[in-house]
Image: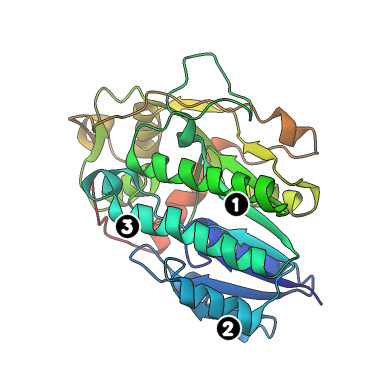
Amino acid sequence: MSRLLVTGGCGFLGGAYLLHLLGRRDGADVFNFDALTYAAQPSRLAGLDRDPHYQFVHGDLAEAGQVRALFKSHGPFDLVVHFAAETHVDRSLLNAVPFVQSNVLGTQNLLDAFRAQTSGRLIHISTDEVYGPVPPGMFLKEDAPLHPRNPYAATKAAADHLVLAAVRSFGLDAWIVRSVNVYGPGQYPEKFIPLAVTTLLSGAQVPVYGDGEQVRDWLYVEDFVRAVRLLETQGRPGEIYHVAAQDERPNRKVAELLCALCDVPVKDGIRLVDDRPGHDRRYGLDAGKLRGLGWSPETDFGAGLSRTVDYFRAHPHRPAGVR
């Protein structure tokens, strides 16, 4: 029976991946290693505790001894899917240290332990933000140079380089997934869409940076999970794969759609605030490589937003954290 390690499985993406994986009952023993920081939502996985093939292990990737103990006690792992990361740009602008510890040191500690077991595959989850801003009409391929412009993006770019260095130096069987903005039910309310929804449902105004014309590509969480699952078998060492819906929308237009779904007039629901430092205007990924493997997004943006709003209506969550 195969053994699978998921780092950050109590986060939004890792949790969605675990629910999809264990819902398919494909027989793997699955270990979820998570530090349970502020954005973790273990309650989403409550039903998994009854699954004999699932085990939660509390620990911090930034602590090398804990990572070595994880691999010694529960390894070797046939597959490692590395979601664990600090991910919120606003927080990285206030204090970059936790991002360096989690995203850079944590990734290196994981690579060291993975390398020591001498076999297995590893998927590293990254972001489109490592490329920096992309001009209108341009969609980057996987060999584009990296130009991160905020501390979060810089630490993810560093982690990507560490993964690729491990592949080239030591022959590790590892590859990278870079995704556009993923959204959906259960996301911690600090990212733009869940923050906007919870803010509107609480009767407050959504803060939109600058003129609100920053463009993002939005991908529903289940479509992202299907991409990662495909790459479990189709990924190749040292390769990078883009996951993108290529469904671009300005932030202000997204906020207006959410106002309509939350039954709030736009004039009452949105307020423009000072832009944040180094705010990238647009990202754009070419996902042709992944589409060539048979993946394509299935969830319409409007349908995905409706499901997200319905979730937060049923699970009230007052917006918290950095605005």
Q: How crowded is mark 1: few (under 14 residues within 10 Å), some or many (20 or more)?
A: many
The tag earlier along the polypeptide, 3 or 2, is 2
Q: Which amino acid does label 1 sit on?
A: His
Which quarter of the picture shows residue 26?
Answer: bottom right
Would residue 187 be seen by someone viewing this image from the given angle?
Answer: no
Q: In the picture provided, is 135 more to the left or to the right than 28? A: left
Q: What element carries label 1?
A: strand
Marks 1 & 3, CB-CB < 8 Å contact: no
Q: Residue furthest front?
A: 169
x, y percent for residue 313: 39, 57
Q: Can you tell which of label 3 and label 2 is closer to the viewer?
A: 3
- Tell me the residue that label 3 is attached to: 98
Whole-angstrom CA distance, mark 3 to mark 2, is: 29 Å
Residue drawn 73% across the image and 32% down it? 289
Q: What residue type is labelled 2?
A: Asp
* Vertical order, 161 against 39 (above or below): above
Q: In the picture provided, is 43 more to the left or to the right than 79? A: left
Residue drawn 33% across the image and 37% down it? 150
Q: Which amino acid does label 3 sit on?
A: Pro
Residue drawn 36% across the image and 67% down it? 37
Q: How many labels does the image show?
A: 3
Would residue 68 be seen by someone viewing this image from the given angle?
Answer: yes
Whole-angstrom CA distance, mark 1 to mark 3, is: 19 Å
Q: Is mark 3 on a helix, strand or loop?
A: helix
- Tell me the residue that label 1 is attached to: 124
x, y percent for residue 12: 48, 58
x, y percent for residue 19: 62, 66
Q: What element carries label 2?
A: helix
- Tell me the residue that label 2 is attached to: 49
Residue sitting nearer the eye, 192 or 139: 139
